[in-house]
Amino acid sequence: MRSSERNRYQNAMTVSNIGLGSIFSDPFGKSATKIMKEIMTSEVIDDNKILKLVHKNSKNKDKILDALHGYQIESDQRFKMERSLDHMEYLDEMIKACEAEMVKRAMPLFDRFLHITEIKGISSLSAIIIISEIGTNMSVFESDKQLACWAGLAPANNESANKKKSVRIAKAGQYLKPLLVQCALSSITDKQSYFGIKYSYIKKRRGHKKAIIAIARMILISIYHMIKTGESFNPSDYESLMNPKPKKNELTLDKALSFLQSQGYDTSSIQLSA
């Protein structure tokens, strides 16, 4: 509902010839919100006052006034924007109340699952939502593979007459799968992190979408074992992936001959012993 209201508000901005959406990465950030509040409440816009409302680290600061050039908010668009803002504020209050209630209800179980927030990309709220779907008793799943299938993160095995028809993931996990994908996207923002490196390797071979699903599946499997054993996040290949040992540059016969040739030596007269 909040996303719908945001889209409705941005549509009114576009109709009113307000191009802040193309200047700010978040049209509902602090700077954009302050500018829109000034536009909505003032009849005459002072350029210097508008520029003072922008955060000092904001990019494209010189293009902000151009984005407001020629704007005109009609009465119907103004009414729609005001109602959308009121509704968004109400929804924000409801969301905060729901989140507070979720934390309150999950607090007695924190010692069982809160350590999964050690996984990069999983916040405390994400951990609570994940546990609300899979629970804290991992014995209900025969293995981590069964959990991945239940969440819709395992490739399908659609094969007939030795021909694979499709390996797409299942439609299961209506609520859990989108959340894990968002966690996966957050975990790869740091390209030097464990999942960031894993993502880079898979993306080269399989592409972005399949790589993200693979990372989401890795995160879920990590959660399964962390909750089942109570251990911290420590994958078996963590050390080798984060601190790879340099490959030994062994000197072979072919490499030695190639080096001599590159230095201008004639290697045709060299007799190689068996």
Image (cartoon, rainbow, N blue to C red):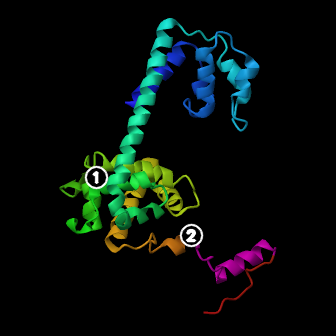
In this view of the protein, can residue 129 be seen by the observer?
no
Q: Residue extending furthest left? A: 161
Q: Quadrant of residue 259?
A: bottom right
The earlier-in-sequence mark between 1 and 2 is 1
The span from disc 1 to disc 2 (Cα, nearest Å) is: 29 Å
Q: Residue at x 53, y 18 (%)?
A: 13
The residue at which mark 2 appears reads as 242
User: Which sits in the foreground, 183 or 118?
Assistant: 118
- Amino acid type of the residue tagged 2 in the rendering: Met
Q: Secondary structure at mark 1?
A: loop
Q: Where residue 101 appears, x then y in whole percent?
A: 35, 47
Q: Is residue 252 left or right of residue 78?
A: right
Per the rendered image, the range of residues in magenta is 242-264
Q: Residue at x 76, y 74 (%)?
A: 261
Which quadrant of the rendered structure holds the C terminus?
Answer: bottom right
Mark seen at residue 152: 1
User: Which sits in the foreground, 242 or 133?
Assistant: 133
